[in-house]
Image (cartoon, rainbow, N blue to C red):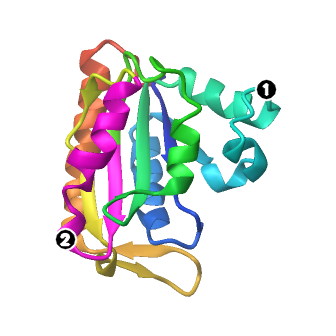
Amino acid sequence: MSHVVIIAGTPSKRSRLTGLTDYSSHTLSKAGISVEVIQVTDLPAEDLVQAKFDSQAIQDALAIVDGADAVIVATPVYKAAYSGVLKLFLDLIPQEGLRDKVTLPLVIGGSIAHLLAIDYALKPVLTALGGRYILGGVYAVDQGIERNEDGTFTLAADITARLDRSLEELRLTLEKDGITIS
């Protein structure tokens, strides 16, 4: 079975970015793909900030990334770049840590003006980590994701359509590369 890890680099689990990651996790699971989520904010802050490679929590999270066939990197855009929380975690991934893994960026921002953050901020870092199979990614404007009273999220039709296309591309890439899906 293919295994995908979602690295959620949002400082708040109530972020609308969670709507994108929840939708992605659910969609991939329905397709028979194993999904695991790393909420970077669940890792010890001191271990992240001080780059404590010997931290058991950090080692466990890095092992999850290492064992994945594909990695979804999810982040909000702040100041035209990915979040600092995500940066702290990405700095701990070994230089070739994304080698031979399909990678899909998911980014949310306050306006369409930050769309290029995927190409000019996030993708170069993923490439530096050995990523060679980086899919186009999905950028969503946060007004297109509604936070419901029960803690769930409702995504606008255009966002779900783009996510569905990207997740299908991810699934097909895993299948094409001979990674068993179910």
User: Is residue 72 within the magenta segment?
Assistant: no
Q: Which one is in front, 46 or 13? A: 46
Q: Amino acid at mark 1?
A: Asp
- Identify the element where label 1 is drawn: loop
Q: Residues within 10 Å of mark 1 (few under 14, many from 20)?
A: few
Would residue 6 appear left or right of 142 to someone viewing this image? right
Magenta stretch?
Answer: 105-129
Residue 142 x/y as whole percent: 34, 75
Circle 2 is placed at which residue position?
Answer: 112
> Which label's residue is closer to the chain start, 2 or 1?
1
Q: Amino acid at mark 2?
A: Ile
Residue 13 x/y as whole percent: 59, 66
Q: Which residue does the image show at 27% across and 66% down from the upper left?
A: 140
Q: Which one is in front, 44 or 7? A: 44
User: Is residue 119 within the magenta segment?
Assistant: yes
Q: Quarter of the image containing the C terminus?
A: top left
Q: Quadrant of residue 70?
A: top left
Circle 1 is placed at which residue position?
Answer: 54
Q: Which one is in front, 4 or 9? A: 9
Residue lying furthest front? 50
**Residue 175 appears in the figure:** yes
Q: Quadrant of residue 141?
A: bottom left
